[in-house]
Image (tube, helix red, strand yellow):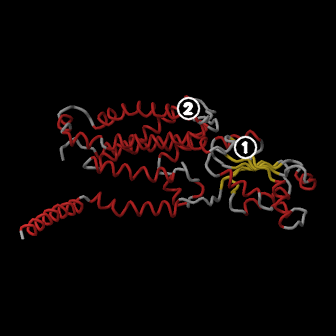
Amino acid sequence: MERAEERSQHLRRIAAVAIKEVRQLARDRLTGGMILGLPLMQMMLFGYAINFDVRHLDAAVLDRAASSISRQLVADLEATQVIDVAAHVGSEAELDAELRAGRVAVGVVIPADLERRLQARERPALQLVVDGSQPTLAAVVAGVAAMPLAARHGEQPDRAEAGRAAARRIEVRTLYNPEKRTAVQIVPALIGVILSMTMVLFTAGAIVRERERGNLELLIATPLSPLELMIGKLLPFVGVGLVQASVILAVGHLLFHVPIAGSLVDVYLAALLFIAATLALGLFVSTLAQTQFQAFQLAFLTMLPSILLSGFMFPFEGMPRAAQWLAELLPLTHFNVMIRGIVLRGATLPELLPQVLKLGLFFALMMAVAIARFRKRLD
């Protein structure tokens, strides 16, 4: 009898603790929202936004033949829905500039003697130049080259012969990563991913930590303005971020033989701008959270879409338009374009001006909102 009563008391105490936890979860709206919001967000990201069936790659066309056949070939390429002609250029230098700045992912080069090449079958009739700094694009363009496009122009071969003819007539040249090594594509973008994880986490709990430790009372008694406090909290982590970027660059170059085609000055300026943007995001998160646990939850909520939608591992062009619009709001999306452009394609910051302006605007907006939300009060 006594043992039964003792077991009953244990069960009542356990039930009391469980009820207390349920009530606490009910009061914590952020955690409650994460219980349903996080799996729903992951399902949407993995099931809807991530797509390896890449379509509508922006392409620049260098047509030296300027004939009806060359125009038909370009139309055939667009009919595959993999390539969309975004620009026509007049020289190889203009084509290189479009690819280097990341404005297009594919270049279509049609030689002046196109008709003779189609008849002779000895040399490729046209060339597809693909940006090898981005994941999976080379394989996608190689698939386009294998299509029997040449069968429409003066020939009636069977299907097998058509495939071989297309392979002979369309040459694929991979720029910036001719060996098609995954490390070359991934390592530069890792700078942004790691900085996103560390910078947002470091600063997300900044204001919350001051409140939980009681240091906010001291800050209230000082003449510090919100802007001065925010900048003072950002500055130490700027140095931390630059050190992390240097370590990743050095390890990638020494161990994985990742080339650095651009200027190191441009690399560090781009990293500095991205660090400032992510730190500002972390400060904004810290003004939303009431506890460090909530700050960590919100920081994680911002990191997952950034990694999955930024083009770090999955092709940006394969995402639906709605997902691409969402990705445009994330600083990592623009930094990936910048860091791959500088490190792998040898681009300069002026050539990447749209991404520079977007990151600068993101930093200014996040800082303004964080400063507006911050109040030097204990409540």
Alpha-carbon distance for marks 1 and 2?
A: 22 Å
Hey, what amino acid is under mark 2? Asp
Q: Element at badge 2?
A: helix
- In this image, 328 relative to 279: left or right? right
Up the image or down, 52 lies above or below 211; here it is below
The label shown at residue 95 is: 1
Q: Amino acid at mark 1?
A: Leu
Q: For residue 228, what is the image quadrant?
A: top left
Q: Nearer the viewer, residue 368 or 9?
A: 9
In the rendered view, does 10 fall on the left or right side of 248? left
Who's the residue at 20% across and 32% down the image? 222
Position of residue 157 in the picture relative to residue 233 (left or right): right
The residue where tag 2 is placed is 266
Position above or below: 106 against 376: below
Q: Position of residue 124 (x, y in %)?
A: 85, 50
Q: Residue furthest left?
A: 2
Task: Choose between 11 and 187: the one closer to the eye.
Answer: 11
Which mark, residue 9?
A: none
Residue 287 point in image, percent of width and height:
29, 46
